[in-house]
Image: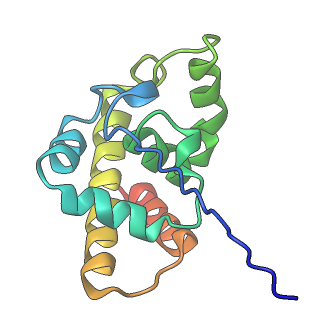
Amino acid sequence: MLYLGCSLQVTITISLQAVGGATSSIFPRVEALLLNNTDYQEALEFVAARKKMEKYHSMIDFLFCEIFTEYQLACFHFYNGRGHQLHEMISPVQKFHFEQALLKALEIAHATWRRKKIMSWKKIQTTVQEMYEAA
């Protein structure tokens, strides 16, 4: 006897906004880079393929919280209505240095993506954190 089977595969794609969430409008140069050049969005998704970006409300929230992990809890508290946006928690000097670090992370991601080279998220995180700490 011959049995024929049929299978169905469903793929759900969740599109993450580039900006918004806990980091809304705090890093305008990072926002501009992501909004004006979708290559940077694709690059970030490429290097973070094994990360759960969908936990965050925006790509910038993801980028910031996954590099500066000490802010993850504050971000999720904000999402749950029990916390503050990032601009209420950091100084203008910190804001400047964080933005520089995020721009560097996007440049690393973009270069990695262009070369289709594999680079671990941990390597990107460490490189950016070292640059931030040296500033």
Quadrant of the image containing the N terminus:
bottom right
Q: Nearer the viewer, residue 5 or 11?
A: 5
Residue lying farthest to the top in this orientation: 81
Task: Tell me if residue 104 can be seen.
Answer: no
- x and y, in percent, of residue 63 in the image: 44, 50
- x and y, in percent, of residue 114 in the image: 24, 80
Q: Give the residue drawn at x 47%, y 33%.
A: 57
Residue lying farthest to the left in this orientation: 36
Q: Nearer the viewer, residue 26 or 97?
A: 26
- x and y, in percent, of residue 19 in the image: 31, 34
Residue 103, above or below 119 = above
* Residue 4 quadrant: bottom right
Residue 86, above or below 27 = above
- Horizontally, residue 32 falls left or right of residue 107, namely left
Task: Tell me if residue 97 can be seen.
Answer: yes
* Residue 31 quadrant: top left
Residue 82, above or below 135 = above
- Horizontally, residue 35 falls left or right of residue 41, namely left
Quadrant of the image containing the C terminus:
bottom left
Q: Nearer the viewer, residue 98 or 59?
A: 59
Q: Give the residue drawn at x 34%, y 54%.
A: 101
- x and y, in percent, of residue 3 in the image: 81, 81
- Horizontally, residue 119 falls left or right of residue 73, namely left
Residue lying farthest to the right in this orientation: 1
Q: Give the residue drawn at x 14%, y 55%.
A: 37
Residue 99, above or below 126 = above
